[in-house]
Image: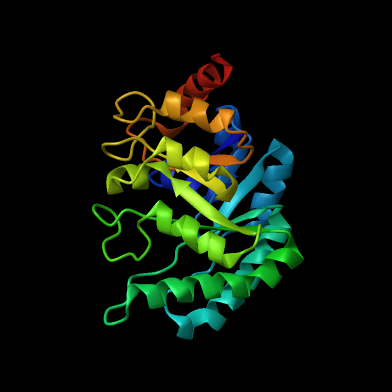
């Protein structure tokens, strides 16, 4: 498994563009980064710096249209096609997606079915471009009120219904902890359905090691021992200088990996 730095989270307060901060990621020791939206990004500059620095783009978010709303399905698939072309240009293999807000006046089972059907409609695109689409449960208690998909258990169920190895779950450990739905046993049991992780500390969504309630050393060892070989995105809001914090975090993560 490997770690990727979420640029808009870690460097969001720097005032710098994505291409400007990529060398700092390398200086801190990391070889992978990830993004939220790609619209407005200087793709040519990112590609050039990736090549110069030996960086890889681990994941980015797709152009968004709600999956809970079946009327937006065509828009969603078209946005996915555009994102797939960006992935081809930048050498990315994982696309992150949210599913949309919970719709009022429509039963949850109807919205659940719409999400699963929408994901199935995406499979031909994913197969053509050799991509994995990961759906993300988010906490509705603090950060995303009204969002439909808060439960990892329901996310795993949706992935089963999508019935494709190209559709998996983004398990955000911070969000599931806030939700009260976090479980290492559930992670290990469903590791084949997980295509990407996110991590941040609680409370505060800051650096994941140090002043944090979550036992990330134990969690990360369990994920490693499960045989997981994918990415773990560092999606936190730093309380100290971003690059300095990344350097310290890199050393801490190396210690965890090397521990028996």
Residue at 29% from the left image edge and 25% from the top image edge: 211
Residue 258 in the image: above or below residue 103:
above
x, y (%) of residue 76?
54, 75
Asked whether 128 or 84 is in front, the reply is: 128
Residue at 66% from the left image edge and 69% from the top image edge: 123
x, y (%) of residue 90?
69, 54
Colour treatment of the image: rainbow
Left or right relative to 89: residue 71: left
Q: Which quadrant, please, contains the N terminus?
A: top right
Left or right relative to 144: residue 37: right
Asked whether 149 or 131 is in front, the reply is: 149
Residue at 47% from the left image edge and 86% from the top image edge: 71
Question: From this viewpoint, which residue is outermost toward the left?
Answer: 141
x, y (%) of residue 183?
39, 39
Residue 128 in the image: above or below residue 249:
below
Residue 196 in the image: above or below residue 78:
above
Asked whether 70 or 52 is in front, the reply is: 70
User: How many numbered marks, from 0 up?
Assistant: 0
Q: Which quadrant, please, contains the C terminus?
A: top right
Residue 207 in the image: above or below residue 191:
above
Is any atom of residue 234 visible in this view? no
x, y (%) of residue 72?
48, 82
Residue at 58% from the left image edge and 73% from the top image edge: 79
- Residue 214: image quadrant is top left
């Amino acid at each position: 498994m490997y770690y990727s730095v979420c640029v808009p989270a870690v460097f969001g307060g720097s005032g710098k563009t994505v291409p400007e901060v990529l060398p700092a990621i390398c200086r801190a020791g990391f070889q992978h980064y990830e993004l939220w939206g790609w619209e407005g990004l200087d793709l040519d500059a990112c590609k050039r710096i990736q090549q110069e620095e030996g960086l890889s783009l681990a994941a980015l978010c797709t152009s968004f249209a709600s999956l809970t709303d079946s009327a937006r399905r065509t828009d969603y698939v078209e946005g996915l096609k555009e994102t797939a072309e960006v992935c081809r240009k930048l050498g990315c293999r994982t696309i992150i997606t949210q599913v949309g807000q919970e719709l009022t006046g429509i039963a949850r089972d109807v919205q659940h079915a719409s999400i699963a059907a929408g994901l199935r409609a995406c499979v031909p695109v994913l197969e053509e471009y050799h991509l994995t689409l990961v759906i993300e449960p988010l906490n509705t208690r603090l950060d995303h009120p009204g969002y439909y998909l808060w439960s990892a258990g329901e996310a795993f169920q949706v992935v089963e219904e999508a019935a494709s190895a190209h559709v998996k779950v983004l398990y955000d450990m911070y969000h599931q902890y806030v939700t009260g739905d976090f479980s290492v046993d559930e992670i290990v049991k469903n590791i084949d359905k997980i295509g990407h992780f996110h991590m941040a500390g609680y409370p505060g969504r800051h650096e994941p090691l140090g002043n944090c309630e979550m036992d990330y050393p134990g969690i990360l060892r369990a994920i490693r021992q499960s045989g997981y070989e994918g990415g773990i995105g560092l999606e936190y809001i730093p309380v100290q200088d971003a690059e300095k914090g990344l350097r310290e975090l890199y050393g801490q993560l190396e210690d965890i990996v090397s521990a028996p």
